[in-house]
Amino acid sequence: MTATMTWIMPSSRLVRRVAAVTFLTLVLACLLAQGADAATHITTDIKANTTWTTGGSPYLLDKQVKVLSGVTLTLQPGVTVEFNSGQTLIFVVEGTIKAIGTEANPIVFTSVQAAANEGVPGQYKGISLSSGAGAEFSYTHFEYGGYGSGGYYAAGELTVQGAASLKVDHSIFQHNQYAGLKLAGTGVTEVSHSRFEENGDGVSQSANAPGAFSLTHSWLNNNVEDGLYSNFLKTSTFTGAVIENNEISKNGHVGVDIQAYCESPTADFPHGHGNDIFANGNESDGDELATFYPCKALSVDWTSNYWGNVDFISAREPLLLKGFICELTWPKEWYEAATDQSLGYLAYSAYETNALNPPPGPISTSIAAVLDEPMICPDKSIEFYKVKQMHNSFYLAPGEISESPIPIE
């Protein structure tokens, strides 16, 4: 009897202990599961100063939300923001947003699908800074958004409107359907030490009178269309973008694509130094730097860059090539040089098949000069060829061409 009692009592205590441990384990597992599934759904505008913490992350945007004017939204390092309502969903900032992450704990803007490992470009529209807004992003990732329509420059994952100001550093824009960064306003934008990879365009600047823009120590690589696209009207008056110490390579169309009127002041055109610009477009020759409208050479300063495999041509006399164009007739103006040609110009051709090699002068072509049928000049003395497409060139001082890539960090 005593032996039996001695054996039964420990077993009862053991059973109770096992049951208690099992209960605590289930409670803990339940709590952990709830924590893993926890998310903060954002369905109303942000009307007072607010901080989004890691404890409330991820933050799910279930509808269009605004940060109202005069209000500051702060994101802590490690916060993830997920767009949860389709391609047209946009996050509008009228006030101020500060997203300062760290290298170990970046802040991430992404889609709900991408968070579930099902991300594709264009799953939401993106973030829009309204006129007067202010934004600062550091160690922030922008991905799988940028939904839009039209050319790749026409929309962006992060869009700057009006007089909004923006500062970005150590951030990544990737897998966005249209531009990673779209500049459509007059405010000041500063970008440094950031990556733009596998977007439509890396950065697009398209406005009547774009604001000041500087891009330094950054990478624009492997984007579908252009690394940097810039478009503005001939009536604009602003200081051209400063593009310095970047790598712009392996983009599908042009490294730096400038679509501006010939009548625009040359000060309006982007200019750059210390960049590595190579292997864009056709890798054997490259569409490195081009403008859309055919006109005379422009004294836009792109000195001290590494260009990879492109042709550089210096011209010291105004060009009028007999046998190619007629004197005093169109398209002579295409080949007019700037007043002082002794400084030299950049020229290249992308495709050699059925194309004319660039003449010895200030011509920069991304399609080269595609020959049409020969024509006779008015005096019937010489033949020339009409040119279907040409791109103008930029000032490039001799002796200042880097023969090897320039370290950007």
Image (tube, rainbow, N blue to C red):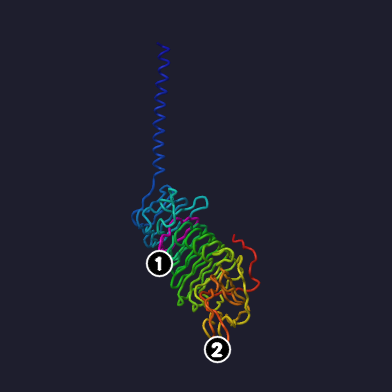
Circle 1 SS class = loop
Q: Which amino acid is tagged 2?
A: Asp
Give the foreground label among 1 and 2.
2
Q: Position of residue 145 (x, y in %)?
A: 43, 57
Start-end of magenta stretch:
127-149
Check if residue 273 falls in the magenta segment.
no
Circle 2 SS class = loop
Depicted 36 relative to depicted 401: above or below: above
Q: Position of residue 135 (x, y in %)?
A: 45, 61
Which mark is on residue 131? 1
Residues at circles 1 and 2 in contact by the CB criterion of under 8 Å? no
Which mark is on residue 379? 2
Q: Residue furthest bottom?
A: 379
> Is 315 in front, or is 343?
315
**Residue shown at 54% from the left, 69% from the top:** 242
Of the 4 image quadrants, the one containing the C terminus is: bottom right
Q: Position of residue 65 (x, y in %)?
A: 36, 57
Label 2 Cα neighbours within 10 Å, binned few <14 / some 14-19 / many ≥20: few
